[in-house]
Amino acid sequence: MNLTILFGDEKKELQVNNDSKKSLLDVLNENGIGIESDCGGIGKCDKCKVRVRELSREYRACELKICNLYKSINEARNIKGEGESIECVTIEIPRNISAHMKIEGADKSITNDASRKVPSDCCEGAMIKGREVALAIDIGTTTIVFALIDDTGNVIDTLGMTNSQRLYGADVISRIKVATSGKKDLLRKCVVDDLIRGIREICTNNGTSVAGLNNIVIAGNTTMCHILMGYDCSSLGVYPYTPVNINTIVTDTQKLLGFQEDIPVIIPPGFTTYVGADITAGLFSIEKDNKETFLLIDLGTNGEMVLVNKDRILVTSTAAGPAFEGGNISCGVASISGAISHVTIDKTGMVSFETIGKSKPIGICGSGLLDAIYELRENGYIDENGLFIDKYFEEGFKLYGSIRISQDDIRHFQMAKAAVRAGLEILLQGLNLTYEDIDNLYIAGGFGSGIDVKKAAGVGLIPRELLIKSEAIGNSSLGGAIKIANHVMYGINKYTFDKENVNIEEVDKLISLASEVDLSRHDEFKEKYMEYMYI
């Protein structure tokens, strides 16, 4: 059977076996036609819906097997008396957010002084004004961000893109399920292809080459790092959630990514299975004098929290879900061009908004969702339980065109923020501290870089008591990777590279000082979770 796939202004022809039991979603993804599937293909998110022109109806691509599609079309033809079996089928994809979409404003999401940029016209071959260069990468569940730096730590250029693994689920739990269902190599290929493309692009854009890099540092959560390394992910999803390896990994581009060039690659250690290398890097990016008591919260698809009090470090994580990054939201998208990022609503229902890149709205990202929920509550469209008034209960609240906030969207957000807030409270209890003892609250993550802190406190995501102490610091994972890449640059001669002598002792020290708080074993977590479901 011949499939004609129509998506946007593009068209692609595919040949498939009429008897194939593969889902249409798998066929599309295998052929580089990426459509969203936040739920990982289990039929819950509705984002993979396609229209079969010959049947004049929509189907979830994850549930539509090729053999059943062929059978249904020809049964319909027989009923109509249209004779011979059809061998050409047209599939329309009404909504297509490419897995390879670039992330807008990637340079704005870097924390600390690492965001200082050097004009790209200063490049001279493999060197930047006679300086060596290195690459820092943050592999997020939703996005991947690259930063090219010189040996002073200055950021020369940045590049961001959506993680193409998102086609197989919006959160780490979905990815673990997909990886353990026999698609581990497919997920690894997604991230390797993304890395190869991103590394080559950022090097080419700046007049250098892969061979010109001194080192590459890659930070990411434990699941992302396991998939990249080709590790078995099955133990990450079942108690006691044991990782294969969360120690410092030192390898090279040849072994890891298949480059001809043999460039050192360093993956920093993780604290625990669910507080991984991205959080280690994030904590490392915050320069402190051991006198400050502070909280670091990374608001991504997995809410990780760190409490630092002198030489004591407590870490924990909670399954916040992907709502903060547009996942499992009916009109949710990542922080790409056209995403509604900020919203105001007045009492008459008039909506004003901003989009990333000032482009035509295509959906709503996490910061826009937070704004919208705050505005809906402030103006009486939803109550303290997050329930819409009758007028909007069924259809939701329209923001623009077909983009709206649904009752389920609000519930997903409530569950995410309640999990984070409850985890925060339990963490403070672990060191017998109160809000008054906290000097600073640092909010990290792509979502964290774009939020209105006042509105975050207004919906109960962060404590009002810490509002004046709160600072959105952006992508601290990338900031830490930059700092590590700059740190090891002085100790690496890539031509006589000794993997046993890569010294990131300062990072390893953070691991030695840390203790984990397991929220699943904490009696008060569920009680506090329910308390913070209120808006």
Image (tube, rainbow, N blue to C red):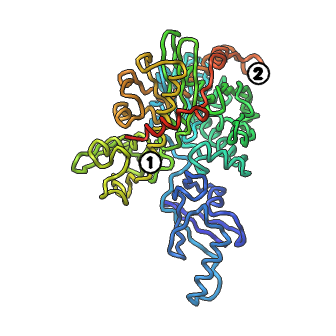
Give the residue pinned by disc 2.
499
Give x and y (percent) for residue 295.
Answer: 49, 22
Residue 168 is marked as: none
Give x and y (percent) for residue 505.
Answer: 67, 14
Q: What residue is rendered at 46% in x and 28% in y?
A: 443
Residue situated in front as seen by the camera: 131 or 74 = 74
- Which of labels 2 and 1 is toward the front? 1
Give the residue pinned by disc 1.
411
Please tell me how crowded label 2 is: few (under 14), some (14-19), or many (20+) other residues with Cα within 10 Å.
Answer: some
Instruction: Classify mark 1: helix, strand or loop.
Output: helix
Q: What residue is rendered at 44% in x and 30% in y?
A: 108
Extreme bottom residue here? 81
Residue situated in front as seen by the camera: 523 or 447 = 523
Residue type beneath disc 1: Arg
Residue type beneath disc 2: Lys
Instruction: Classify mark 2: helix, strand or loop.
Output: helix
Label whose residue precedes the other's in the sequence (2 or 1): 1
